[in-house]
Amino acid sequence: MLLDQCRRIWVVGASSGIGEALVKALGHPDRTLIISARNEEALNSLAASSAGPCIALPMDINKEEEVDNACRSLAEQPPIDMIILNAGTCEYMDSNRLDLALLERVMQTNFFSIVRLMDEALPMMRRALSQGISRPKLVVMSSSVTYQALPRAHAYGASKSALRYFTECLKADIQKEGIDVRLVSPGFVKTPLTDQNDFEMPFRVSAEDAALEIIKGLEGERFDISFPKKFTTYLKTLARLPDAWRFKILGKMSRHEQVDAPSQTHNNSGS
Ligand SMILES: NC(=O)c1ccc[n+]([C@@H]2O[C@H](COP(=O)([O-])OP(=O)(O)OC[C@H]3O[C@@H](n4cnc5c(N)ncnc54)[C@H](OP(=O)(O)O)[C@@H]3O)[C@@H](O)[C@H]2O)c1
């Protein structure tokens, strides 16, 4: 299905950054956008300024009851042509202390909650197919960090790599049903998420440009919509280098400072 023919699109993670830019770019008098995130105020103001019908459907993707309620309300409305699972979070980790609570938080939002949404999205896509909509789209937001592990991205990279793997498995199976599954793998995009970064972000693009790249990718046939090319090519090339070279380069990027081994207390009283 061409984007022009999409009459109903659900964007999850629409209140800021790439999601907000996508909503602005996709707004059209002949298309209904349904927009979700936790920040209800931001969703309402985005809906009010949209170029076409736009319905705010607030929910926290980590709260099962809120997701259930949102999906139940969508089941009572006309079918959806495209679902964009864009919601996500990022927290960096240090290797001095492997923060498992941080890992669980990031995995919960970026992987488990998105997978639960995929499970809700599939019956919606099948309903669209049964009502004559050809090739409804399921779009999943991953990251170019999945091409090559980068220092401090232990949790974020693992969550997005898990999502990539899961989405590929899903596509392999459900493509024969006529559901068009896509993955998006951006490099750095200027959004509230990256505004917290205190390191250089090569080839960073604006959220508006990212939205245009995603829309262009969705008009084409590629499974993995990745950009900007200079950055993704760099990461893919790095990933193909012999390990010794790769880790030398990665080591230069690392900020890790060697930690002294804990001093051992010897108890020799018994000897
Ligand atoms: N910016 C980059 O460089 C970059 C690169 C690669 C991939 N990505 C991915 O792109 C996606 C969008 O990120 P962004 O950069 O645009 O950051 P952002 O401005 O922080 O947007 C994140 C979106 O996800 C929503 N969200 C987060 N947690 C949620 C939750 N528990 N329930 C519902 N919605 C939730 C946020 O809304 P609320 O806070 O209102 O809930 C917001 O709408 C993320 O998946 C991110 O990993 C970003």
Image: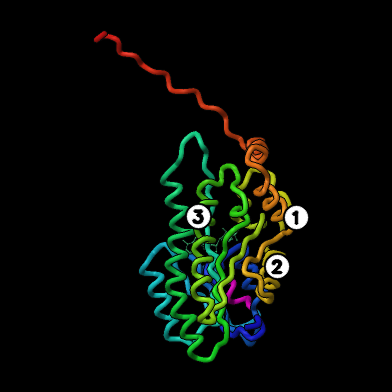
Q: CA distance from mark 2 to mark 3?
A: 23 Å
Q: In the figure, is residue 240 to the left or right of 59?
A: right
Q: Give the labeled residue for mark 1.
A: 230
Nearer to me, 226 or 236: 236
Given contact means CB atoms under 8 Å apart, are the residues at marks 2 and 1 in contact?
no
Drawn side of residue 167 relative to residue 237, left or right: left
Q: Which residue is mark 2?
A: 213
Q: Which mark is residue 248?
A: none
Q: Kindly indicate the quadrant of the structure image that contains residue 76.
A: bottom left
The quarter of the rendering in which ligand 1 is drawn is bottom right
Dividing the picture into quadrants, the one containing residue 183 is: bottom right
Residue 9 horizontal/vertical position (percent): 56, 79
CA distance for labels 2 and 1: 14 Å
**Residue 72: image x %, image y %?**
39, 79
- Which residue is outermost to the left? 270
In the rendered structure, are the residues bearing label 2 and label 3 in contact, judged by CB atoms less than 8 Å apart? no
